[in-house]
Every structure is written in structure tokens, then in C-alpha cells.
Amino acid sequence: MGNYVLDDIDREIIRLLQEDGRMPFLTIANQLGLAEGTVRRRVGKLLDEEILKIVGITDPFKVGMNTVAIVGMRVERPRIDEIALTLSSMPEVRYVALSTGNFDLVVEVVVKNNDELLTFLIKKLSEIPGILNTGTSIVLKVAKQNLAWSL
């Protein structure tokens, strides 16, 4: 894995699936002038190479998860990978990134309410060795979220 080179056909298949992740292979094939089997094989390869992932995405605010927060963390640098792995395993953590700037790690936390956020920040994070300090911002409203960026 990792050496797969995208061509224009792959990019078009990805673009169409970004518009509609449930688009049938036959529809894609017809739009691109390809055989359905060709599209099926290429999508399979893109999935195998982890270039493409097809998922259902929910809006947390519409499914009762009313508190979304971005938490920046300063951590003991030698433990950064271990801490990121621990955070990644937590169900309320939706996103974990190693970063530059004011924080070593940035995570997105999605919970039902502010009480659950408080429990996460005070109790759960304190159980993870190596977190030095945190800065938390509550997401009031998402103005843009585009998971389908162009190639």
C-alpha cells in the first residue's frame, strides 16, 4: 500500500462518490463511459489502498449530542503518540490531530451536554498521564463542514 497513483478516472470516480456515496457503480460507469466492472475494480482498489472511505456521517446536534468542543492539549512530547492513541480510543472523541503552535494535540469532543463535557475534561483527561494543560472551545454552530474536498 501507499504507492498507488491516482489517474483522472480515479479522480472522477472519487468526485462522483463524494457527491453521493451510495451512487451505484452502473451510474458512475455510465457517466464516465466505462464498464461497470471497471468502476467496481477501481473503487475496490481505492478502498483497499485506503485512499477512499465511504461512511455515513451524522450531524451531532441533530442526534442529541448537543455539546461539541475543540480541546487543545500541551503534552509531554515523548508521550504524544501514546496519548493520541488513548484519546483515539475514547468514544466521545471524534477527531485527534498532532499539531504545531500553541497545542501539541487538538481533539474534537462530542457529548450530550455540558455535564458530560465537564466529566470528560476533569475526570477522563486527568486519568491520562502526560497531559500538561488544556484549552477548550465550545462549538456554537458549524458554519462549514466539507468532508469532500477536491483532488
Image (cartoon, rainbow, N blue to C red):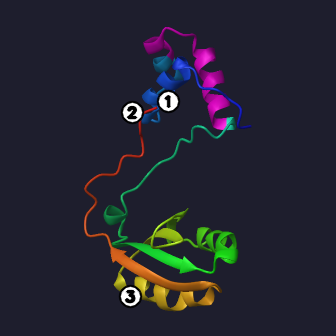
Residue at 54 percent across and 10 percent down: it is 34
Q: Which residue is mark 1?
A: 14
The magenta region covers 29-47
Q: Position of residue 61 (x, y in %)?
A: 32, 65
Q: Are marks 2 and 3 in contact (CB under 8 Å)?
A: no
Relative to 69, is 132 on the left or the right? Answer: right
- Could you say where residue 107 lies in the image, as x and y percent from the top left? 49, 69
SS at circle 3: helix
Question: Which-is-in-front pick, marks 1 and 2?
Answer: 1
- Asked if residue 33 is among those painted magenta in the image, a careful observer would answer yes
Question: Is residue 126 shown above or below 51?
Answer: below
Labelled pair 1, 3 in contact (Cβ < 8 Å): no
Q: Residue furthest right?
A: 1
Category of crowding for the residue at label 3, using alpha-carbon neighbours closer than 10 angstroms: few (below 14), some (14–19), many (at least 20): few
Q: Which residue is mark 2?
A: 19
Give amino acid for label 1: Ile
Residue placed under numbered mark 3 in the picture: 115
Q: Label 1 to label 3, Cα distance in Å?
A: 40 Å
Q: Is residue 151 above or below residue 80?
A: above
Residue shown at 35%/83% (left/top)?
114
| Residue depicted at x 61% and y 89% | 127
Magenta segment includes 5: no
Q: Looking at the magenta stretch, what is its main secondary structure?
A: helix
Q: Is disc 1 placed on a helix, strand or loop?
A: helix
Q: Amino acid at mark 3?
A: Asp
